Image (cartoon, grey):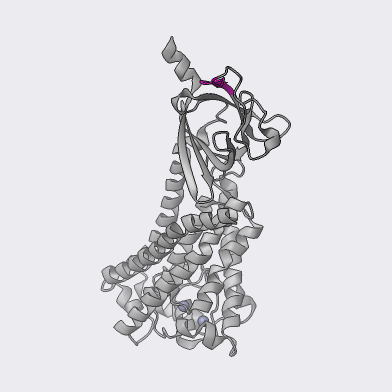
Amino acid sequence: MNDTIQVYLSAWPTVWAMDTARYLVGATLMATILALFWRAGLARRKLQARDATGADKRREILASLRTAFIFSLLGAIVAVGDHQGWITIYKGFQQAGPLYLVGSLALMLVAHDTYFYWAHRAMHHRRLFALFHRTHHLSRTPTPWAAYSFAVPEAVVHAAFVPLFLLFVPMHGLGLLAFGIVQILRNVMGHAGAEVHPASFGPGRWLGWNNTTTHHDLHHEAGRTNYGLYFRWWDKLMGTEHPDYRAKFEAIVAPQAKTTSPAIAGRVLAWAIAGSVLAGGLLLAADPAQADEAPTGRWATPGVAAIVELAPCSGASGLCGTIRWLWEATDEKGRPRLDTQNADAGLRARPLVGLSILSGLTRSSKGGWEGRIYNPEDGQTYRATVRQTAADTLTIEGCVLFICQKQVWRSASTLAAALR
Ligand SMILES: [Zn+2]
Ligand SMILES: [Zn+2]
């Protein structure tokens, strides 16, 4: 239980910072594109005669920051689930390759669109609307800042998708990152207030199965149609697409057929996804803990107090570590040192040399190895993370409740070489 709370508390600040930054960067990017290209063509693509007021934007920003906070409260549960093994987040490509990353990302987007469509339609039910969804529709003329402008109950509904999806489908960390980027970029594009998609996103064109700014803007202006998030599939299938959508989109993009600037939003999206996937791939490739083999062999603890051998566990999976040599192998009377501090009195007669102190180390999805370490000095067993941080260096982190300690072990062969 304490383990769970510790993982949650240590993950939450990062998740909160990422959710908040994702919103601020996405909305600022869209607002900047609108400002830069307004006169060059986007002004002619403005979707409503009405202008959003300063008060609208302030309300949208405050509600969105609150939503990012709610997202992080639920998002940190994902870190706990990964740690506890309820869900799987791959870090490298050992268990599932790049093809799985791309396929699972596509599946996640399709599943999210389905979840969003039905949750969104439900929230338009007259009994649910006031509690869940009225806050979002206070924006009759949305701006990019409205991306996360939700009441608290609606934010919880949206935040629940990622943990629920991960219960069924293991994802790469990189796939989750790409999902977060696509989600916020599509969201700010939908609320841009001026059509930022090129004509190729029009109905019947080759990207026409995607939603556009016109599509979601009509939802804000007229309500009760165009419930979908990324795709038009559900609205078409369920007959909930606005009857004027096609005509409106074509009218708004037609006069600018020769203007390429509005298409920049689509390009920014493509480059952002490609860039993040590439950067993540490079990070994975550069991570020594991922590239390295299992850190088997003999290791010296600080001050060469002991030599511990890491090897595959006998009769079980994973790695185990056994004390092979002690600087002080005997007590003052010359007898072999025993496991005298053990909480279990029946085990106190065990000799320390030959004692297994690291057990059940398995490869962690976050890199390195996770298992248990027994410290004969205090008779306690700790949760341990073992990482090979250099060719001759092993970093051991052991935690009991909230107290963690780090130790650096050195390869015994480096010591042997120094003695020659
Ligand atoms: Zn709605
Ligand atoms: Zn909206």
Q: Position of residue 35 (x, y in %)?
A: 27, 71
Vertical comparison of 290 with 50: above or below: above
Task: Farthest residue to the right: give it.
Answer: 315
Q: Is residue 106 magenta?
A: no
Q: Which residues are magenta?
A: 324-332
Say which quarter of the image contains residue 198.
bottom left
Task: Farthest residue to the bottom: give it.
Answer: 126
Image point 42% across, 47% down: which residue?
279
Image point 54% across, 71% down: which residue?
158
Q: Is residue 260 visible?
A: no
- Residue 266 falls left or right of residue 245: left
| Helix, strand or loop: magenta stretch | loop
Image point 49% across, 28% down: which residue?
301
Q: Is residue 330 magenta?
A: yes
Say which quarter of the image contains residue 365.
top right
In front: 88, or 359?
Answer: 359
Q: Is residue 39 visible?
A: yes
In front: 14, or 56?
Answer: 14
Vertical comparison of 254 with 141: above or below: above
In front: 239, or 398?
Answer: 398
